Image: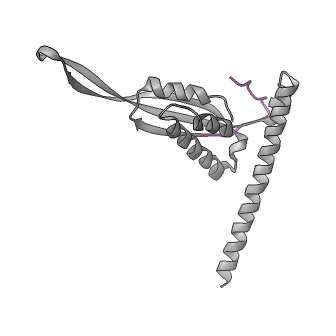
């Protein structure tokens, strides 16, 4: 797990839950463990190339949670990391499986709940706490990408406001 941030930095958290997913908690937990601790773009890239069937669902929950962070706290995907990603047990449907010689067995159709919490990254603490030059360069590059993304989003917002004013004048 990532090191805890210094007390002066208070990271913003955003959570989302997807309930009653028709997959067993074990299988979904494997995918959740794969992305825990990664930045959101890295996690989505890992899920894009994952052979697991429900990886696309986890990726969509990550995307929706990142959109919530953008709406509520003005944070881009590059400024967020997957703080918590865990699976809880949902309801279980019990069905009958017929065997030979008139016998029966039970079949369980398990359901899961996916919980995702994203946290704002403290780049200064990550750079200061990096163990080597490569890790420090990686966090510096990620910070530059996040700042460039933030400037691009601000420019898009200004453009939308300008277009709204033009439409409002006519």
Given residues 138 and 100, the one toward you in this image is: 100
Given residues 109 and 68, the one toward you in this image is: 109
Tell me where the magenta segment starts and ends, as one range: 1-14
How far from the left and from the top, in percent, is residue 105? 21, 18
Is most of the magenta stretch helix, strand or loop? loop
- Identify which residue is drawn at 69% across, 51% down: 74
Q: Is residue 7 magenta?
A: yes
Q: Going by the picture, which residue comes out furthest to the left?
A: 102
Q: Left or right: where does residue 96 sit relative to residue 31?
A: left
Is residue 167 shown above or below 64? below
Q: How is the image coloured?
A: one colour
The C terminus: image quadrant: bottom right
Given residues 133 and 166, the one toward you in this image is: 133
Report how many numbered discs are placed on residues in the image.
Answer: 0
How far from the left and from the top, in percent, is residue 49? 59, 35
How far from the left and from the top, in percent, is residue 136? 85, 29
Q: Is residue 74 magenta?
A: no
The N terminus: image quadrant: top right
Is residue 17 shown above or below 96? below
How far from the left and from the top, in percent, is residue 86? 53, 28
């Amino acid at each position: 797990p990532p090191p805890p941030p210094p007390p002066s930095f208070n990271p913003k958290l955003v959570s989302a839950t997807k309930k009653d997913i028709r997959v067993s908690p074990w299988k979904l937990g494997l995918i959740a463990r794969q992305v825990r601790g990664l930045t959101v773009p890295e996690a989505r890239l890992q899920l894009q190339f994952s052979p697991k069937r429900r990886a696309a669902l986890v990726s969509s929950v990550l995307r929706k949670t990142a959109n919530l962070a953008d709406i509520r706290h003005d944070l881009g995907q590059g400024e967020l990391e997957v703080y918590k990603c865990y699976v809880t047990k949902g309801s279980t449907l019990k069905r009958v499986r017929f065997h030979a010689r008139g016998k029966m067995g039970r079949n369980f159709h398990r359901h899961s709940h996916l919980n995702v919490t994203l946290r704002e990254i403290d780049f200064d603490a990550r750079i200061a706490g990096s163990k080597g030059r490569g890790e420090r360069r990686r966090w510096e590059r990620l910070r530059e990408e996040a700042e460039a993304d933030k400037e691009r989003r601000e420019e898009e917002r200004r453009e939308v406001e300008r277009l709204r004013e033009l439409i409002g004048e006519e």
